[in-house]
Image (tube, helix red, strand yellow):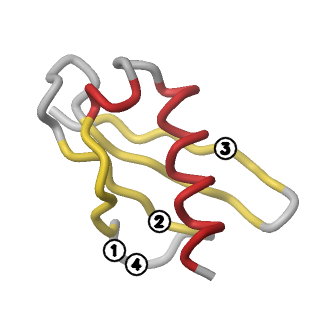
Amino acid sequence: MNTHYSKRYAWGTLEISANFGEASSQIRYRVNQDDDFRVTPFQVASAGHSTTKAFALVNRWLKGQN
């Protein structure tokens, strides 16, 4: 079951969603409560099963997309 987490940054609110108990679970995100969660290139294993590391990965990745 996916769990949703949110974190506020200066640029807005980042939400992530994944099953943090399953290494192969895809990490999804949305910004400022967009309608749908979008896929990232990361799996829970990439973040070491840590929501803190997942936020850091996704935030860094999003900054690189701009």
Image coordinates of residue 52 in percent, x first then y, are 58, 26
| Mark 1 and mark 4: Cα distance apart in space | 4 Å
Q: Name the residue under label 4.
A: 35
The mark nearer the N terminus, 1 or 2, is 2
| Mark 1 and mark 2: Cα distance apart in space | 7 Å
* Element type where label 1 sits in the image: loop
Q: Residue at x 53, y 59 (%)?
A: 61
| Mark 3 and mark 1: Cα distance apart in space | 17 Å
Q: Mark 3 points at which residue?
A: 7
Q: Do the residues labelled 1 and 4 touch (CB within 8 Å)?
A: yes
Callout 4 crowding tier (Cα within 10 Å): few <14, some 14–19, many ≥20: few
Q: Nearer the viewer, mark 4 or mark 2?
A: 2
Q: Which label number is shown at residue 36?
A: 1
Image coordinates of residue 6 in percent, x first then y, are 58, 44
* Element type where label 3 sits in the image: strand
The mark nearer the N terminus, 3 or 2, is 3
Image coordinates of residue 48 in percent, x first then y, are 37, 18
Q: Do the residues labelled 4 and 2 touch (CB within 8 Å)?
A: yes
Q: Which label number is shown at residue 10?
A: none
Q: Which residue is drawn at 62% across and 70% down?
A: 32
Q: Which label number is shown at residue 30?
A: 2
Q: Do the residues labelled 1 and 2 touch (CB within 8 Å)?
A: yes
Quadrant showing the C terminus: bottom right
Callout 3 crowding tier (Cα within 10 Å): few <14, some 14–19, many ≥20: few
